């Protein structure tokens, strides 16, 4: 099962190209995630929609895109062609990571006409005559999103996707180019780790590693949003501390000589579609300066690493992970271990 994700700025011609592409790729189906967004406008309270601003900011939209794509492929097989702008890297991680967890390969292509061409195409878009404020809602809305597209292109998008310069191409010619690029491997499957989704509560072990300034090592996974500690799910029959040591070696190349000391046991409540479970944090100690400078990251799984102060970590980590870290640091200072439920110490 395969997804061909056609990315690009608003007005780049993604949907028109996708319609041409399904005629060129055998057993392919068009799936436009805009349909999911439109459905949510009918299902969610107006207050919640107003809070989000853009439906892509709704976690339920991102989950439903993954679930709907997986459901369509389970029903129809073949290839799903998805024309959808994705400019936020964390949303790309969440959606592509969710597809990878379902063993669905993703080819990520970016339609990248010159900006002058893009503006000409936006200016030439038809505005429904009966649409209130149509000029503002259709054209100006697209113009306003050129800058975020430019920023994403410079920071991560160009390196992540296979670029197709469509400045001089018709939608049909673009579709031919995409079909050929996917077919011959010029637009390879996204290099993203496949982490199977849990089917029950899980036990996970993380390890805190520190530099000579007592900053903690954080890593940026490619397959889910937000920074994280080195670590992962404990395998069947594996001791949790040993699992943490194994994950540290796999993720960073650092071999811990001693079994790390337990700092925190945190029960993470299930929040559908997640199952929750026990999350353990261990103290891996202070790294020698040579070790800290030789951190190695596996490309498909982790994008970046850095040492962070507690204050910096508060900005980088999702709230539940930050609370876990905060109490782990207090436990480390006190030389004890703490039991938490949903990030709150008890007992």
Image (cartoon, rainbow, N blue to C red):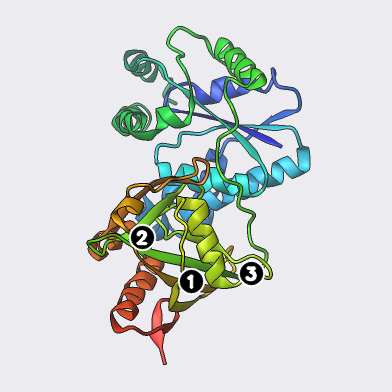
Quarter the N terminus occupies = top right
Q: Secondary structure at mark 2?
A: loop
**Image mark for residue 249:** none
Left or right of 21 in this view: 166:
left
Badge 3 vs badge 2, beta-carbon distance below 8 Å: no
Question: Around disc 2, counting alpha carbons within 10 Å, would you say few (fewer than 14), some (14 to 19), or many (20 or more)?
Answer: some
Q: Which residue is mark 1?
A: 259
On the image, the x and y values in percent for residue 29 come to: 69, 31
- Image location (x, y in percent) of residue 111: 47, 21
The picture quadrant where one finds residue 311 is bottom left
- Residue farthest toward the top in the current orientation of the protein: 168
User: Cα distance, mark 3 to mark 2?
Assistant: 27 Å
Q: Is residue 9 visible?
A: no
Mark carried by residue 317: 2
User: Mark 3 or mark 2: which is in front?
Assistant: 3
- Give the residue at x 40% y 53%: 219
Q: Secondary structure at mark 1?
A: loop
**Between 233 and 162, which is closer to the camera in this rendering?**
233
- Considering the image in quadrants, where does the C terminus appear? bottom left
Coordinates of residue 255 in the picture (x, y in percent): 47, 57
User: Where on the picture, by quarter, is residue 159?
Assistant: top left
Taking the image as shown, residue 111 lies to the left or right of residue 176, namely: left
Residue at 33% across / 34% down in the picture?
A: 155
Bin the neighbour count of mark 1 within 10 Å (Cα to Cα): few under 14, some 14-19, many 20 and up. few
Q: Going from the N terminus, do you reach mark 1 or mark 3 first?
A: 3
Task: Evaluate whether residue 89 shows in this view.
Answer: yes
Above or below for 119 versus 302: above
Q: Is residue 342 above or below residue 47?
A: below
Q: Which residue is mark 3?
A: 238
Q: Residue at x 68, y 44 (%)?
A: 103
């Amino acid at each position: 099962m395969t997804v061909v994700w056609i990315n690009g700025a608003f007005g780049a011609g993604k949907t028109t190209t996708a319609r041409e592409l399904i005629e060129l790729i055998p057993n392919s189906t068009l799936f436009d995630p805009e349909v999911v967004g439109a459905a949510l406008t009918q299902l969610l309270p107006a207050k919640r929609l107003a809070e989000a601003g853009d439906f892509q900011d709704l976690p339920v939209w991102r989950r439903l895109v993954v679930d709907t794509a997986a459901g369509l492929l389970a029903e129809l097989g073949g290839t799903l062609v998805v024309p959808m702008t994705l400019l936020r890297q964390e949303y790309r991680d969440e959606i592509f990571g969710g597809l990878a967890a379902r063993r669905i390969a993703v080819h990520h292509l970016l339609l990248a006409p010159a900006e002058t061409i893009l503006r000409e195409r936006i200016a030439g878009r038809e505005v429904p005559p009966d649409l209130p404020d149509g000029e503002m809602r259709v054209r100006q809305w697209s113009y306003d999103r050129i800058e975020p597209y430019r920023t994403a292109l410079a920071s991560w998008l160009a390196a992540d996707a296979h670029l197709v310069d469509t400045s001089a191409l018709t939608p049909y010619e673009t579709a031919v180019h995409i079909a050929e690029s996917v077919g011959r491997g010029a637009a390879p499957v996204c290099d993203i780790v496949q982490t199977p989704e849990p089917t029950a509560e899980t036990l996970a072990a993380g390890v805190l590693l520190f530099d000579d300034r007592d900053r903690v090592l954080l890593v940026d996974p490619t397959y889910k949003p937000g920074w994280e500690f080195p670590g992962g799910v404990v395998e069947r029959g594996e001791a949790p501390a040993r699992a943490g040591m194994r994950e540290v070696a796999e993720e960073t190349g650092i071999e811990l000589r001693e079994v790390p000391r337990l700092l925190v046991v945190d029960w993470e409540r299930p929040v559908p579609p997640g199952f929750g479970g026990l999350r353990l944090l261990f103290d891996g100690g202070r790294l020698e300066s040579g070790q800290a400078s030789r951190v190695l990251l596996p490309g498909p799984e982790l994008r970046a690493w850095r040492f962070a102060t507690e204050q910096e970590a508060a900005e980088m980590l999702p709230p539940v992970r930050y609370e876990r870290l905060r109490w782990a640091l207090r436990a480390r200072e006190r030389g004890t271990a703490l039991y938490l439920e949903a990030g709150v110490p008890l007992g």
